[in-house]
Image (cartoon, rainbow, N blue to C red):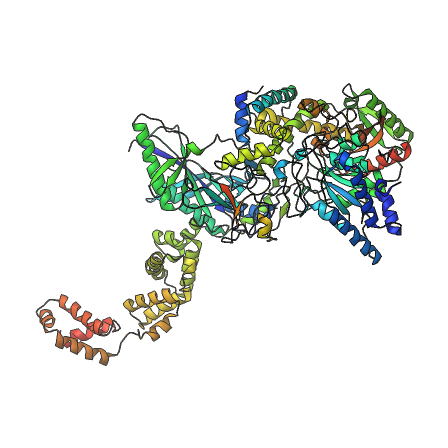
Amino acid sequence: MQLYHMTAHRLQQMLAKGEISAEELCRSVFQRIDEVEEKIRAYITLDRENALQQAKAVDKARRAGEQLPPLAGIPVAVKDNICTKGLRTTCASKILYNYVPPYDATVMELLHDAQMVLLGKTNMDEFAMGSSCENSGFYPTCNPWDTDRVPGGSSGGSAAAVAAGEAVLALGSDTGGSIRLPAAYCGVVGMKPTYGAVSRYGLVAYASSLDQIGPFARDVTDCALMLNVICGHDPRDSTSVPYDKPDYRTFLTGEIKGMKIGVPREYMGEGIDSAVREIINKAVRVFTDLGAEVEETSLPHSDYALPAYYLIAPAEASSNLARYDGVRYGYRADKSEDVVDMFKKTRSEGFGPEVKRRIMLGTYALSAGYYDAYYNKALKVRTLIKRDFDRALEKYDLLLAPTAPGTAFKRGEKVDDPLQMYMVDICTLAVNLAGIPAISVPAGNVSGLPVGMQLMGKPFGEGEILRAAYAFEQCSGICCQLPD
Amino acid sequence: MAQYEAVIGLEVHVELKTGTKIFCPSSTEFGAAPNHHVCPVCLGLPGVLPVINRKVVEYAIKAALALNCRIAPYSKFDRKNYYYPDLPKNYQISQYDLPIAANGYLEIEVNGRAKRIGITRVHMEEDAGKLVHQGSISTTPYSLVDYNRTGVPLIEIVSEPDMRTPEEAAAYLEKLKAIIQYTGVSDCKMQEGSLRCDANVSVRPAGQTGLGTKTEIKNMNSFKALQRALQYEIERQIDLLEQGEQVVQETRTWDEDRGVTLSLRSKEEAHDYRYFPEPDLVPMVISEEWVNEIRSTLPELPDRRKQRFVRDYGLPAYDAAVLTSTRELADYFERCVELYNHPKTVSNWVMGDLSRMMNATGTEIGDVCIRPEQLAGMLQLLDKGTISGKIAKTVFEEMFRTGKDPEAIVKEKGLVQISDQAVIEKVVEEVIANNTKSVEDYLSGKERALGFLVGQVMKATKGKANPGLVNKLLREKLGK
Amino acid sequence: MISIKEVEHVALLARLELSEEEKEVYTKQLSDILEHARKLQDLDTEGVPPTAHVLPLQNVFREDRVGEHLDIEDVLSNAPEREGDFFKVPRIV
């Protein structure tokens, strides 16, 4: 097996034993990027020189006998909505095509502290608005399993990079499924932590009350290692929760006897492909075999998550994206009569159609006369959805569901019908509204395309989610299947 | 004119004197080079998040308590959305439906009549940056933006529409300024923009209870401007009604040079601020303990202090009101009285010569270089007879200019009063010899002539002769 | 659900300039989405408090201590147009 296809925990051991150097590993990944990037287009910006330098620095430190953090020298890709000091951060938008942040996001500081090697910035749907990576302002990313198909979105570049061997680990962000959906479509592990578990400082906001940074990995162990790096309280983020961060590896025991798992029937209904349902049912049997108690349950307000989400998220986005006006950074339209004209032209030329659509929708939902009927109503429904989860998670340790209603679809299939595109997220949105953690792990294949299983847990219950996911991974043997 | 009544409410913005901005650790210091007091947060860079400065909340509560407000047990921030190039995020973090405080009041006095003005609410928000243009905003080809002021903490204090005249509005603003200054949470300098005032004005036939259509007046940068603008606007509205026309609800700006209010309507878009809860901040729960802790740090406020000045120092109410109009002036007065225990004398000097010279030179009390010790020292020299009342004024002016001790000035300039009988006698004799006409007048019964002769002696001694002694010697010599 | 006029008004509020074609497309698409959102009206939310925050957090404050300012070149390096240490914008009115 090539180095670029290995898991981080295996590479970590090889590095520690001196069997390979970080530089070799880094070169291997860049060699892979050179081979496949043309077909996949996972990246917006590559940072080859700095990556090699970082890798060499790690090797030097190791030779000097320094005690290194666990993921030192592991190459990582970062979604292009996470600010990197001195390295272009575009959110895949023309409006930020040339923006170079003068500061690092908190997670970037943590990656640097962990001495991980930053490969570059990955492609995404513009400002994280989308489910297919087709809304990138630059070019779409392709699914490594079938390049005619989408990798899922919005963190499609990060998912595709990990699946294609163009990165060992990656960071994405998840506002309504933007980590879990592409993880499912690309056959990798992806996790959205509890809202407040990972600092949002430096994550370019889409919908502030829903956004959360999380990892992509090739297996559950790697996911746990990455969580160890990025989780924790940050005083620069008022919505970051002070909590005792555990070592997430300690949950990887394979032992889940007596664990109570609920399968909400609303997530296994008609809207879900029968083949996907079959795979999920198979997964349920794996859990039963492992000694977990699995039963059907209900989240009665599930149907309302989509409309609530598509009012709340665009409303916040309409405000969050107001700052892109051509005054301080990014794109500015030329030949404007006055400042209002400049604002309008800059934003109309700089934003893509989906971003404009959501800004319009959100502006409308907040505007005079509609606030109560739309935005505030959605916030109340959010309460009901959250209560569904609170109630279910009182009874069950975890909830199990498909990550997406189907497998990766063909590029262009849904671009003209926004509502159809939004439907792709019906299994993932509610988790963000409730603020709880959830993982997507590979659960099987349908016609050569990966299917993801989603495990949802209590707030700050990442450990229990990892425990179950790890046990499933070990027992089912479904993991680390990577396309050539 | 008499059959109309104006209804005025004020919205006052006060910059809080914290060291750092409301949501980030950038400095609030006034006067830095453009865009030098900014960080990623106040510059609104993609990805940044606000964190509330605890001191801002404390200061807001302190000001609100001084204004007799009820502090909200639960409060939150909201976003107010509008586009303007001085607003880096194109939304302002402010407070909408759950402000930090509400339901307060303050007392004003106009023409001897006391009146209570209600305060609707006090809320916290961030300031915007500054636009710099060459010449006027309407003719300049481009503008320059300085974001140093963005994120400086503000409180907005909204009054009830309780004022009826421009004088009442000015009295309200004066009192508000005094109270806030006393609390120490703001400088309230109108010329530096740390105190800003907008007004809502309407008129209605006297006796009517319903409200007329109001206009909002902006850009009044001094107390005088406030009064002039209100006066103008009230008359404008009455004229409209008299001519059978309607007042249009709109925002108007005060044009200081032309002395008129002008409609901003043409430049205004439909206002729809789309307020919603700020998702990047969590709510504030203000405990009673916290409020009490802040309450315990409140100083004696102007009304209370004024009453004490009347009671303890026996000052007339007018003196007490003037002396307590700012905390610094009241502190100055009290320090002087501590050193020289004749309150009315001190009051006369502070309200008389000191105020006159401060006004003439545009000096604030904090910048006056006469220390209370020096003023008290001068008054003691006067009591001892070392200097005359007339000389005292000279000494005072010199002290005001140079900050030197009164003793040093007296010595340096040879201003010590001449009380040596022999010296004065000699001058008196000379004056008598040289003013025979006046002497005759006096001797023929014209008492007034004596005053002239005294003046001549004083002139000859450069004002230093002891006036009592001069009088006495003149009368003796002239044989009366 | 939503008229072209409302789309125009919303575009103005959001500082977007839409072509005639875009206006039509957005009118149709936003109507579809809002039609779907009408579903929420079926739910009785009488007495249900709105959830703007899922967190149990309150009173998150920082102390009033001055931190680092950005270097002036970092402030202005991304500026589309500058003059001296200022950002430069077209005429306001």
Q: Nearer the viewer, residue B64 or B80?
A: B80
Residue B212's image quarter?
A: top left
Residue A414, percent across and down? 70, 23
Q: Nearer the viewer, residue A46 or A475?
A: A46
- Which residues fall within the magenta stretch? A137-147
Residue A183, percent across and down? 78, 33
Q: Is residue A151 visible?
A: yes
Magenta-colored segment: predominant secondary structure: loop
Report the label total.
Answer: 0
Residue A69, percent across and down? 80, 51
Q: Nearer the viewer, residue B122 or B241?
A: B241
Position of residue A355 in the picture relative to residue B92 (left or right): right
- Which image quarter holds the N terminus of chain A? top right
Q: Nearer the viewer, residue A327 or B165?
A: A327
Residue C11's image quarter?
A: top right
Say if the magenta span includes residue B219.
no
- Which image quarter holds the C terminus of chain A? top right
Residue B106's image quarter?
A: top left
Position of residue A335 in the picture relative to residue B110 (left or right): right
